[in-house]
Amino acid sequence: MTGESKAPRPSRRVRRQAVLQIASILLVAAGWEIAGRIPISPTFPTFLDTARAIVAMLADGSLPLALAITLVPLGIGIVVSALLGVAAGVAMGLERRVEWLGLPLFIVLQAAPLAALIPLVILAYGIGITTKVIIVCIMAMPVIVLNSFKAVRHAPASLIEMGCAFLGTQRQLILKVILPAAAPVIFAGLRLGVASGFIGAVLAEILITPTGIGDIITYNQSIAEYPAMYGAIASIIAVSVAFIKVLEWGEVRFFRPEKKGT
Amino acid sequence: MAAVESAALAPATGAPQPVVEVRSVSKFYGGGVHALDAVSLEFREGQLTSLLGPSGCGKTTLLKIVAGLIPADGGEVRVKGRSVAGPGPERSFVFQDFALLPWATVLRNAAFGLELRGVPRTRREAVAAAQIAKVGLGGFEHKYPHELSGGMRQRVGLARALAIEADIILMDEPFSAVDEQTRRKFQEDLLELIARERKTFIFVTHSIEEAVYVSDRIALLTPRPGRVSQVIDVAVPRGADRDAIRRHPVYLDMVESIWGGLKQYVE
């Protein structure tokens, strides 16, 4: 009985949420369409033209192929940054000496305009995939490291004290108390890092050698095929959002079950 | 020397023997704060002893030194005749802010002490479930802390402390973060618990009424540096009617006289 009376409420909430989220996307699309029809710039295509360009590129296979090419250095870079970055940040958070050693480096890296390093990386590693992976890493790593560090350093003292009072070993305290407590902020860092990594990947493809999505963007820009250029940009944004959503799911699924359904 | 004496004397006497002994324990904090000054106290088996005093008298510090969570700068803590320097399996702690893992269910939180000790999952969950039922939270095993009220959260903290079957339960202002009605219920339940389990309770509170209501003995601490000014044996008769205690003349007189003694330290 009570289950029945309660049931419609969440589903109505979910439906209202979905309606508003779709409305938000439609509003942006409508604004884009209007801006494209005025047009605010001769190089700014309408939403519908861009959508048609995306469909065309999907149909002839050029867009999926380009995304696949872009995702190789991007994927490697993000996985390396996530593993090394979280490990470095956690180590810095747990051990003062590692903090003093590593923190200045990553604060400088986070403050530096990293795109300026790209020519140096090209000089050192050429124009191959290594360079692109390194650029993704230097974009993604600092924010991942610094968030992991702060998350571990600010793990609630009372929970750590509780773990000590109940005879937790150092290892148990780290695995069962500190890391789960730090997970939300570590994941926030991973989301920001993934977003920066996408910027790095596209930047590398535009600035070094036009491949993948960067190739579609620069090529279509040079032949004034603006809908296709915008379509490529929109598609890489969509992939980035999907990536971040998968991360959010993983966080709730494996680390913070209490956030399920909130 | 003293250790040998007390160990030899204890079985002979009929009075409850001291399970925990604090011997001239001192504590200094950075910046020259003298938190505790040569505090000596005994805590007897099967009794609840309160550490009572105004804020800043170091009562929580003393409790955490007994728990082994902070080191003393002088003196020693003996548990069952052995000098201790860290936490141990015979001592269990109930925290003022509950200290529950927000990502763990009530069941896992209550079983967490056993989990850290490596007790297999099915066994520790059975023990925890029994304690959860005892503290009146049956049916909430699979809820998360944020879904519970403050009072219910502290019941989880209590279940966790009881699940490890320690002989000594240390409670740091356990009811200060719950509302007045819940607090009264907690105090009544605590009397049941003391009567039922033969455990030694050390209880920190800043409430005179609470101390007189739940304690067998009260150690009054003076502020900065914390010293024991008086140890009072509480002689309030505790009949079946728990509410009658609060109206009993002995209860009221004792609250009055403790307040008279503490008044001078309250600015």
Image (cartoon, rainbow, N blue to C red):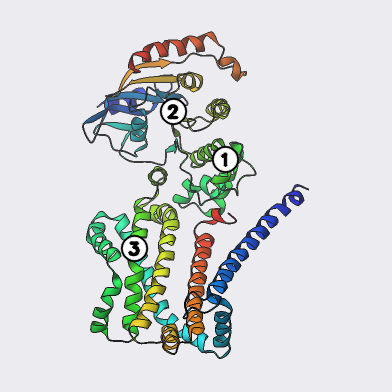
Disc 2 is placed on an element classified as strand
Check disc 2 and report the residue beneath it: B203
Same-chain check, marks 3 and 2 = no
Q: Three-letter amino acid code at disc 3?
A: Val
Disc 1 is placed on an element classified as helix
Q: Nearer the viewer, residue A52 or B220?
A: A52
Mark 1–mark 3 Cα distance, whole angstroms, equals 41 Å
Q: Are marks 1 and 3 in contact (CB under 8 Å)?
A: no
Task: Give x and y (percent) for residue A77.
Answer: 37, 76
Q: Is residue A147 visible?
A: yes
Q: Nearer the viewer, residue B256 or A105?
A: A105
Q: Chain of mark 3?
A: A
Q: Residue at x 57, y 87 (%)?
A: A56
Q: Nearer the viewer, residue B184 or A36?
A: A36
- Compared with A55, B213 (above or below) is above
Q: Three-letter amino acid code at disc 2?
A: Phe
Task: Give x and y (percent) for residue B4.
Answer: 29, 28
Q: Quadrant of residue A15?
A: bottom right
Front of the two marks 3 and 2? 3
Disc 3 is placed on an element classified as helix
Q: Are marks 1 and 2 in contact (CB under 8 Å)?
A: no
Q: Three-letter amino acid code at disc 1?
A: Gln
Task: Give x and y (percent) for residue A80.
Answer: 37, 73
Mark 1–mark 2 Cα distance, whole angstroms, equals 20 Å
Q: Quadrant of the C terminus of chain A?
A: bottom right
